Image (tube, rainbow, N blue to C red):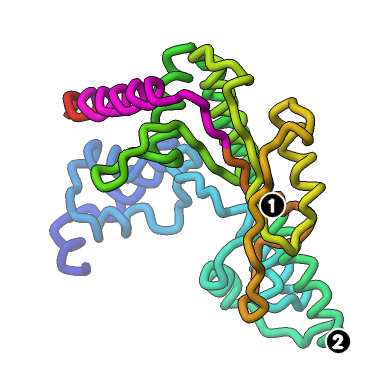
Amino acid sequence: MEHACGKYTDFEGLRERALALRREGLSIRQIRDELQVHNKDVLQRLVKGEPPPEWTKRPRAKDDLRERARELRKQGWTYNRIQAELGCSKSSVSLWVRDLPHQEPKCTPAEQRERMDAGLARLQASRQQEREATKQAAATAVGELSDRELFLTGVALYWAEGTKDKPHTRRECVEFVNSDPGMISVFLAWLDLLEVSRERLHCRVMIHESADVAAAEHHWAGLIGIDPSTLGRTILKKHNPSTVRKNTGDSYRGCLGIRVRQGADLYRRIEGAWYGIVVGANSTT
């Protein structure tokens, strides 16, 4: 660096000009162009001790977190506790506070665990809020469906979840089985669009025999707007005591099966529409 500075005979005079320009708010690059000094080390030497103007400082999104982490560390908080409180990575906490002296904790291990659990609970709640906000924004973006959009949605839904004809098993029938009330609601709305009357529907519940069968029947009947007595015979799945079932509890309602009587023509229309979607999707690539 000394050798580079030696190239400038009036270094001190040059430094005075550089400092003056710095105080006027010029950046390093602007000072370089003004003084025609293109050596980076010399430029740094010329403005040494003079802080850069505020406009040249890049804002950092984590500055507030960093300051908060340092405050908590000074209070004796551990890395894990700071991480849980701020919802940031442990490596970031270490980077921000590693120059601070270690302090003995001001609370017992039990108190530390309690505070840690509370911090984790806040972090989980915050993440859940983010999930819900994302899902709500996506739901709002969908808006009202046109008849065409509902038609195409219903075709894709049926082809994914409904009964299909196979070369080895000829069965051109329309039957849809699902445990998701939302899927059932969309399927029924799609049938309404196709002017399939509810009188043509044969509905029945499929559920484990150890579940609350009556509650499930009332649940599904209420969803589709019929009397439970008009449901077909419920299909009970035998319970195997050697297996551990996870689909238990009050929210378990089994599945609802919906079959459209005299549905061969409707099935052919569904299959043709699905092939049309496949061709249309491929034509866009």
The residue positioned 76% from the left and 40% from the top of the image is: 219
Dot 1: few (<14), some (14–19), or many (≥20) neighbours within 10 Å? Answer: few
| Dot label at residue 283 | none
Q: Quadrant of the N terminus?
A: bottom left
The reply to whether residue 231 is visible in this rendering is yes
Question: Distance from label 2 to label 1 (Cα)?
Answer: 27 Å
* Mark 2 or 1, nearer chain start: 2
Please state the horizontal and vertical placement of residue 252, each as a whole percent of the image: 71, 54
Left or right: 250 in relation to 176: right
The residue positioned 79% from the left and 79% from the top of the image is: 113
The reply to whether residue 68 is visible in this rendering is no
Give the vertical position of 10 relative to 53 (above or below).
below
Question: Looking at the rendering, which quadrant does residue 200 occupy?
Answer: top right
Please state the horizontal and vertical placement of residue 28, each as a whole percent of the image: 32, 45
User: Which mark is nearer the camera, 2 or 1?
Assistant: 1
The residue positioned 39% from the left and 25% from the top of the image is: 264
Given contact means CB atoms under 8 Å apart, are the residues at marks 2 and 1 in contact? no
SS for callout 1 = helix
Give the vertical position of 274 relative to 63 (above or below).
above
Q: Name the residue nearer the viewer: 49 or 246.
A: 246
Please state the horizontal and vertical placement of residue 33, each as a whole percent of the image: 22, 38
Queried whether the magenta region covers residue 274, the answer comes back as yes
Please state the horizontal and vertical placement of residue 161, each as a whole percent of the image: 45, 41
Q: Which residue is mark 2?
A: 108
Q: Which residue is mark 1?
A: 126
Left or right: 158 in relation to 18: right
* Residue stretch in magenta: 258-280
The residue positioned 66% from the left and 45% from the top of the image is: 205
Secondary structure predominantly adopted by residues drawn in magenta: helix
Question: Looking at the rendering, which quadrant does residue 174 occupy?
Answer: top left
Identity of the amino acid at label 1? Ser
Queried whether the magenta region covers residue 75, the answer comes back as no
